[in-house]
Amino acid sequence: MSLGTPEHDTQEPVQHPSREHSRRQFLTYLVAAPTLAVAARIGADGLAPGTAQAVVPSLPAPAEVLDLGDALILAAAPTANLIVVTVDDAGRVGLALPRAEVGQGITTAVGMLLADELDVPLDQVDVTLADARPELVFNQLTGGSNTIRSVYGPVRAAAAQARARLLAAAAARWGTAPSVLTVSGGVVSGPGGRTATYAELSAAAADPGLAVVVATPKPPSAARLVGTPTNRVDARRMVTGQMDYTLDLDVVPGALPTMVRRPPSINGTVRSVQNLAAVKAMPGVVDVVTVATGVAVLAETFGQALAGKEALQVTWGPGTVDGESNATIQQKLRAATLPFAVPPLLTTTVDAEFDFAMVSHAPMETNSAIADVRRDRAEIWSGLKSPIVAQQTIAAELGLPQSAVTVHVTQGGGSFGRRLFFDAALEAARISKAAGKPVKLMWSRIDDMRHGRARAASFHRIRATVAAGQVLTFEHRVASGETDTRHGLGEILTSVAASLPVGGNLSFAQTIFLTTVHSPYQLGVTTHLLNEVPLQMHTGSWRSVYSANTRGAEEVLMDEIAAKLGKDPVAFRREFLKSDRFRAVLDKVATEGQWGRSLPRGTAQGIGFHAEYKSCTACLVEVDATDPRRPRVTRATIAADVGRPINPRGLESQLLGGLTDAIGTTFRAGLHIDAGLPLEGSYSQFHYTRQADSPRDARVFILPATGEPGGAGELGVPAAVGAVANAYARATGTKPRSFPIEFPVDFTPFPR
Amino acid sequence: MPNYTFQLNGETVTVDAPADLPLLWALRDKLGVTGPKYGCGIDVCKACTSHLDGAAINPCVTPTADVAGREVTTIEGLAGTWSDDPDELHPVQEAWLEQDVAQCGYCQPGQIMAAVALLRRTSNPTDADIDAIENVCRCGSYVRIREAIKAAAARM
Ligand code: FES
Ligand code: FES
């Protein structure tokens, strides 16, 4: 396929995103192909509308001017024209989405955009996941809650142009003007009752000689599906067991089930294997090879690979954090915390310190990949949110040209940030090369928790100064273990870092921190500073990156400031929130959740608010802490304004998922590092939320559209962390300072 | 290696496997039945939940030898236990679609099989009965799982 002549070109120089500019500019292409294939480009300046409007006159925080999602969108803009919409000779609409589906429902939402724009039913649309496409450069990364925000424009532009071509083809066939034609259900109708289906028109519509005017996407008022609660397009496959995750695929004949024996501490090395011959002789074991991360056992079944890996006797070299435990990490973080500018004054300051333990991403599907590495080429399958970086790294590792490595993106069984990295894909490639055989690699759950990625531990020191019913200063110092961003996110940010209204030599982590964290309240002079402690552990962005801890802690402090000022937590937030849009979601939960209703002793309400990626949400929960060791959220009310909800039903799921994350990580789910390794290796030890911890009564309210789509995949966590912690504080009369709150080692750790 | 013959989703199958090979791997790696998922291998996460003679089991800790001569049902065969029409789903699966429960979907075969087993034990489960389902959903679809179980109970 090659790009054809632009049908229309209104390209102007890329403008600074802060310049008022909401007009969309389209550049569409006809892609030479047997079926109709239209690509669209949208000017970078039109991609982040709302950016300029979001600026609050008084000293906006960087994230309010340019948030992480904006940065990713701007970085993706030059290649957005390579998003291609097709209509084939069966009338089916297709799009290979350069993003990862890991449960967030983006294939459904993008399908809805296409269905509306092209006037076809949703079941006539196929949204698949694109292989790694290096020509997309920065436009194939799933993160920063940016999928809908970044593809909303280009997908609709390409679809609108495809529709215009189909109409032009029908008009040419019937000798009429396109303007008299109508489309419904993928059928074009013209004068005299003539009809033609997209299937019949697609070939003619692909004719480069066809005269076509430029189409612009429909106005939001013409939406049919968009904005309407819609069930997932892939749900039937999921409930019948037909959805194929990586290890369900039967794509490489003879690919061997493979598991890896890993070191007793993080980043430990293999010195020697004592019983290689004995393990190779075990039933079903086919091969045993040593790679950088451990010793791999290839077998006929995973059961036998697991038995082989457990039987291995390995002498290990030390790891990189063998001396570290939760206590030593906490000490290092405290020591690294940057100082406040304002001195403490007992009468007027509210001070607090918070500790957050490491938290595993722990997606249900453990790290997994299929790799078929040959002498001159390699093919990889894995759930990947940064497949281009994966492809480049694997090619370099194997000594192959990038073009000889094909990387397929498979549907992932959850991610929460984990699949920004490609640990399993790289390891599978190494094993396949070493063994000279194709492999299906699966990490055990124990390894996934102990050697997989996790949210770094963090320490927070917050100080607010209050006087005369006002908050004069608000300072937040965060010290965190290093959050690994070497998946290429850094590269993206580099390309737009100059747009940040902050000078200096920011590290990528600080850039992410500053592009995601800001206070939604008017708290006078507000500063957020991050300092990271380089600990050589396996970390990675965890749903909402820094915000779950940073904003969660701030929401706890907001209650304490309110108390200091003698104000009700909701009334206080109402007064200090920066916009009416924010107040609307707060009011919604206060009303629907019956803020202030009387509750039995030991049970209390708590409130939390959060704004990011041009969206905002409030969460009101009730916690029954009659047994303070086993508190339970009994009722939850959530409201969100995401600018323009594409699929409110999917959005509800995302918000309920965020609430579930908050319940787990606030009450009981965390990792205990001990001698350089997490002790947790099972959901029976890492106490993620179960049904018995989940509210029996939960309601979500999606506010009507107010503008362009904001990000929503991570939005729900920080507000819910605040709400859950605040409800617990009120129910127990305590001030939670260390999370998770209930965090004993209440299990016998598995052997290392 | 010994052979084990059992009923799998309405058909007779024979698998050549060591006696102690967990059924999960006989199903997935030898028989190509991939609906039951691995999530822990030690009877904690319940992602592999399937049925043995109609009751919930966890194939990750069930030796293949134990199912010889018995009837194993995985998510793929669930609809067939309800209706002979290949297009018809089990009412619990229908409820799952109506409530739009699944997010990543990875835990859902196990969740559905656990819910069906619960509804076989009690046709009108209480909230406490539903709370007793231990299957992990890392995406946090619990609220909709609860609604779907109640909807399915009402429908059955
Ligand atoms: S895989 Fe069987 S219970 Fe977890
Ligand atoms: S839907 Fe993803 S784990 Fe349950």
Image: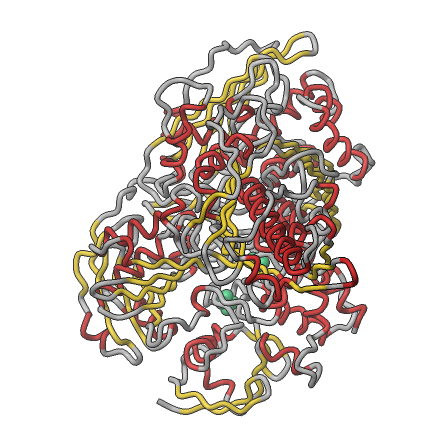
In the image, what residue occupies the spot 66% across and 78% down? B79
Quadrant of the rendering where the N terminus of chain A is positioned: bottom left
Tell me if residue A659 can be seen: yes
Q: How many marks?
A: 0
The percent position of residue A13, horizontal first and vertical second, equals: 46, 27
Tell me if residue B134 can be seen: no
- As rendered, which of A148 and A460 lies closer to the eye? A148
Q: Is residue A650 left or right of residue A456?
A: right
- As rendered, which of A428 and B141 lies closer to the eye? A428
Q: Quadrant of residue A711?
A: top right
- As rendered, which of A411 and B96 lies closer to the eye? A411
Q: Is residue A698 left or right of residue A37?
A: right
The percent position of residue A59, horizontal first and vertical second, equals: 56, 14
The percent position of residue A187, horizontal first and vertical second, equals: 70, 61
Q: Is residue A245 left or right of residue A331?
A: right
Ligand 2 rendered quadrant: bottom right
- As rendered, which of A126 and A282 lies closer to the eye? A126
Q: Quadrant of residue A398?
A: bottom left
The percent position of residue B4, horizontal first and vertical second, equals: 45, 90
Find the residue positioned furthest to the front: A175
> Is A519 above or below relative to B48?
above
> Is A511 above or below relative to A280?
above
In the image, what residue occupies the spot 74% across and 41% down? A221
Here the colouring is: secondary structure
